[in-house]
Image (cartoon, rainbow, N blue to C red):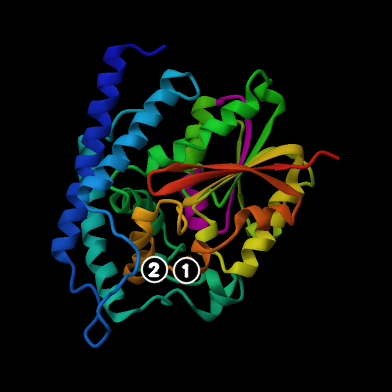
Amino acid sequence: MAGPLSRIGYGVQQGARVAWYVGHYLAVNRMRGPLVPPGEEPVSVKGKVPGWQGLVAGMRALFEQDWKNIEAGLYRAPEGLLAPSEAIATSLRFFRDARKVDERRLSRKHSEVLTPELRDKYPRYYLQNFHYQTGGWFSEESAKLYDTQVEVLFSGTADAMRRQALVPLAQAFAGRDQRGLHLLDVACGTGRFLEEVTENYPRLNVTGLDLSPAYIGEARARLAKRRAATLVEANAETMPIADASQDAVTCIYLFHELPPKVRRIVAAEISRVLKPGGLAIVVDALQTGDRPDYDGLLEFFPIGFHEPYFGSYLAEDFAALFAHEGLAFDGAVPAFLSKVMTFRKEKA
């Protein structure tokens, strides 16, 4: 069990992370233009919007739970902060790109990656500048900036929210030989969550799947030393993964970026590749009513960012969606602005 000094170290580390990324968030807010472009109606939300005190309380609850999980041995403590030189270089790239993102937001340009060449290779819904980010999912620069952009958006809590997916995983894998188990991470992006998985389960057979060649490239570099990790560039709608081959499937922040019809296709694919009794773990944003005091914040998200399918996501019944594909809903656990949903495939 971790001692008091370890807890102090964890607290200092997470406090420094939050301060660093909140500083970036505040600086970007000062740099950016008006909330909505000239001529558009002022932003109006119906739900409650938490103040800073409510958000800080939510962050504190997340980190307290994160530490309890570490102390209970469910997963390892996170590694240290970035080296100063790397942090500064990443920060400079982030701020240089932030101006471009804001210009795109104010002009409502979100289809710059929709080219005839890419349209022949990728689904139409994928060819957008989600969050107004430069390059969409298709450039190496986007892949290198993405993790920083997400941490700034979530004020340094994104990694801690992702780590909550390791809790049901620890429960499912307890007492089992890692070498005989297989995990698939759908829409693995830059491999950030897979890195956490492989640090905790170094002998586990893991596969990361993502449609972006640039993001898969970043994931390959991140996981280069993990011999049991395989990276696959493929569409989650038609995964080149064998039927009933996976003991667990994880999916982090994908479903809110899928059109409703595609969510059902991806859920069916997850069910297909899971073994009977296997576990699906989905981490995504809170939905309307999960935390009523945050409803206005969720309502604003697709207004301030380009998230065309977020509105339908807020009302999606995931228990019913996955039940239709033979996956029973185990439950959901909130994690600040996110939640962890678990589903189990029915045994034959």
The local secondary structure at tag 1 comes to helix
* In magenta stretch: residue 323: no
Counting from the top left corner in percent of width and height, residue 216 is at 52, 51
Q: Compare residues 45 and 226 and report the one nearer the observer.
A: 45
Q: Which residue is mark 1?
A: 311
The local secondary structure at tag 2 comes to helix
Residue drawn at (49%, 43%) of the image? 191
The numbered mark at residue 302 is 2
Q: Total of numbered circles in the picture? A: 2
Question: Range of the magenta residues?
Answer: 201-219
Q: Is residue 136 left or right of residue 8?
A: right
Residue closest to the far bottom: 39
Counting from the top left corner in percent of width and height, residue 343 is at 65, 44
- Disc 2 marks a residue whose amino acid type is Pro
Q: CB of mark 2 within 8 Å of CB of mark 1?
A: yes
Q: Is residue 107 visible?
A: yes
Residue drawn at (32%, 48%) of the image? 151
Q: Is residue 347 left or right of residue 44?
A: right
The C terminus lies in which quarter of the figure? top right
Cα gap from disc 2 to disc 1, whole angstroms = 7 Å
Counting from the top left corner in percent of width and height, residue 264 is at 67, 62
Within 10 Å of the Cα at label 1, are there few (<14), some (14-19), or many (20+) other Cα atoms? some
Counting from the top left corner in percent of width and height, residue 120 is at 61, 76
